[in-house]
Amino acid sequence: MKFANRMGLLGTETAFLVFAKAKALEAKGKNIIHLEIGEPDFDTPKNIVNAAVKALQEGQTHYGPAPGIPALRKTIADDAKKWRGINFNPEQVVVTPGAKPIMFFSIMALVNPGDEVIYPNPGFPIYESVIRFAEATAVPLPLLESRDFSFEIDTLKKLITPKTRMIILNSPHNPTGGVLSRADLEAVANLIDGKDIWVLTDEVYKELVFEGSYFSFASIPGVMDRTIILDGYSKSYAMTGWRLGYGIMPAELAEQITKLAINCHSCTASFTQYAGIEALIGPQDDSKKMVAEFRKRREVIVDGLNQIKGISCLKPKGAFYVFPNITKLPISSQKLENYLLEEAGVATLSGTAFGKYGNGYLRLSYANSIENINKALQRIENALQKL
């Protein structure tokens, strides 16, 4: 079977491959503790579910405007002002089925073949995948454990060339849990000042900050004319299966992104958008409880990993991942991922699933109960003693 050459440029998400492998082992009777999937292990809050049911019962099952229903776009713009301290117009908002389309459409709309896009590495693997699919050059920006998984500004400065068209930022960060400081973000703004460079700032974990306060790149004066905010509902409201995300950008770009949306998916399901309104304006108690529970789990998993010989782990400031250093173990990241799954029944991800600078690390999601995290830690320790 022959496929278009461009298909060879696309990557994938290893998390789903490991998840499938783990499920296959479970089908054979093996008990698996899942620390590989970046998905909150909580139900969507009932008030959000009820809003969707009400919308369905009221007939909100038809086509809607391609960039999103006006009420949701206004709600998102108002909510974004609360988080970022600046005014947004509904015309700047494009609603999509999940947040990934904003990433895909932004690169398609702004980046030409041969352009360069700088992206965090280790980082969400779809960044590099989409850059390559656009026939652009993917330029990795190393995130350093010595800087709490931030980057050296001088390194970024050297990576910027006349061909640089976009820089991707992600804070809080997947897979490390790192949070970029205000000083680092302001330094990025200074580097691109006066240059024709866009910033795509991925902020889907913005409500999962455990130390300090959240600060958005978009909050820096004068940057929104070349900034795209990528955000969504999956992580903050346990709505991964709802597929509801959005982008905030200059209105002129929003028109082009809407054109891509029309060609791709027509519109986002209307009843999920009404649920999205309720998520933002309704009670936030469940979301806050979820964040508090993640904070507790963070303490447990970091302390536990640091007690295992050969492993060291920084305490992440955000998201729900840890990225322990395993370079003192006599096994590679990829082999350790396979070994822990098959020997210990613990599903994790090799750091290399997030790029070459993830070598020597492992990603574990603590979107699981404290009981299961403790069981996983004990299984990991027992398995490593056999190496």
Image: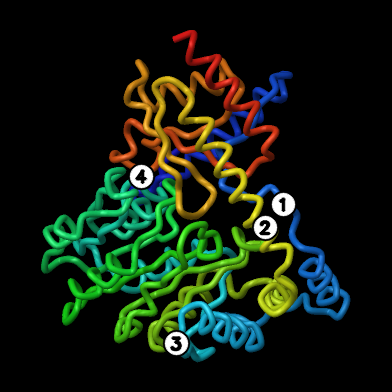
Q: Is residue 184 above or below residue 366?
A: below
Q: Amino acid at mark 4?
A: Gly
User: Which residue type carries mark 1?
Assistant: Phe
Judging by the rendered image, the residue that carries numbered circle 2 is 238
Q: Nearer the viewer, residue 255 or 79?
A: 79
Q: Are marks 2 and 1 in contact (CB under 8 Å)?
A: yes
Tag 3 secondary structure: loop
Q: Residue at x 39, y 75 (%)?
A: 228
Label 2 element class: loop
Of the two numbered discs 3 and 4 in the rendering, the one whose residue sits closer to the viewer: 3
- Which residue is at the front of the view, 363 or 5? 363
Residue 248 vertical placement versus 23 (above, below)? below
Q: Which residue is mark 1?
A: 42
Residue 314 placement, left or right of 234: left
Query: Dividing the picture into quarters, in which one does residue 290 lie?
Result: bottom right
Q: Are marks 3 and 4 in contact (CB under 8 Å)?
A: no
Q: What residue is disc 3 on?
A: 86
Residue at numbered disc 4: 8
Cβ atoms at labels 3 and 2 below 8 Å apart = no
State left or right for residue 63 relative to residue 12: right
Which of the marked residues, 2 or 1, is nearer the chain's N terminus? 1
Amino acid carrying label 3: it is: Ile
Query: Nearer the N terminus, badge 1 or badge 4?
Result: 4
